Image (cartoon, rainbow, N blue to C red):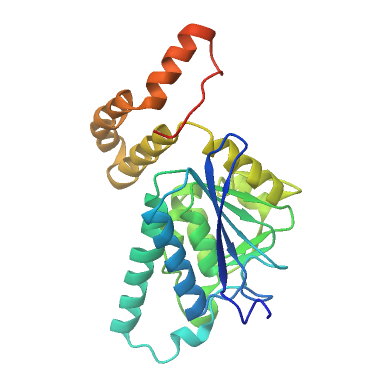
Amino acid sequence: MTASESRPTRLERFPTAAGAEVAVLTFAHGPLNLFDQAMFDAVIADIAALTAAPPRAVLLRAEGKVNSAGVDVHLFDGLDPEQAADLWRDLFAQICHPLEALPCPVVYAAHGLTLTAAFEISLACDIILASPKAKFGLVETVVGLTPSMGGPQRLAERAGSGRARELVMTGDVYDASTLASWGVINAVHDDVDTAARALVNRLAEGPTRAHDATKQIVAAWRSGGIAHADAVTPEVSGALFDTDDLCGAVRSFLDVGPGKAVYAGK
């Protein structure tokens, strides 16, 4: 059975050497990893499974020559404005927002071409790593559309509004080094898959509740600026003092010094 005939994604869970659970979501939908209805349905189901039983870190990656050549344009054929608006609402509600809300670090690894929906999904992750050969684009202008899964606004957050408008309006494809210089990509690695797996293992073995608190504080800043983030930080951070990880790490620091604590994610 070929990749195109099987399920278009694969969700696997692995323990790290220290026993922390890592989930790896792989796009495996033929040579182009096109986002057709089957691909969207599979990603939605996988993110729902991660939400129902969160691991301590998540890696998104792809098999094949490209991460994704974009969306199957057949999905747009014949849609009226109301149907299109409902499509975007569903994709926000079932992919982007729950992906951002996972209570653990989420890393995206791009080894090749990463267009439209795949690029927008990467922008909903916490950290983006790329190969020097990876290329990125929001090329919806070729069908008279603007990216509608959150790409422009999340790109503007990382790179600034001028860069976001340039990338979207030109529809050009950008290399990894350029987007790293813009702050869109966190790091470029020759062997991005190995680097990404090492990073998610490291993050999974860390203080998971503290990582979730970091995400909550940054999310508060995104929605309401520094004042809103300052307002939520006391409760979000204060709650960590009732976690086994913080209590154990403080005691470990005092007893044997920094860097010796072992975290269970509780």
- Which residue is outermost to the top? 255
Residue at image coords 37%, 55%: 52
Does residue 256 sit above or below 152 in this rendering?
A: above
Q: Hey, which quadrant is residue 183 in on the image?
A: top right
Quadrant placement of the N terminus:
bottom right
Q: Nearer the viewer, residue 15 or 65?
A: 15
> Total number of numbered labels?
0
Tell whether 223 sits left or right of 60. left
Residue 169 visible at all: no
Residue at image coords 34%, 45%: 222
Q: Position of residue 158 (x, y in %)?
A: 49, 48
Q: Position of residue 205 (x, y in %)?
A: 54, 34
Does residue 116 sit above or below 123 in this rendering?
A: below
Does residue 74 sit above or below 53 in this rendering?
A: below
Q: Nearer the viewer, residue 36 or 172?
A: 36
Residue at image coords 28%, 25%: 238
Tell whether 262 sits left or right of 86. right
Residue 216 visible at all: yes
- Which residue is outermost to the right? 190
Q: Hey, which quadrant is residue 49 in on the image?
A: bottom left
Quadrant placement of the C terminus:
top left
Q: Position of residue 156 (x, y in %)?
A: 45, 53
Q: Position of residue 131 (x, y in %)?
A: 71, 53
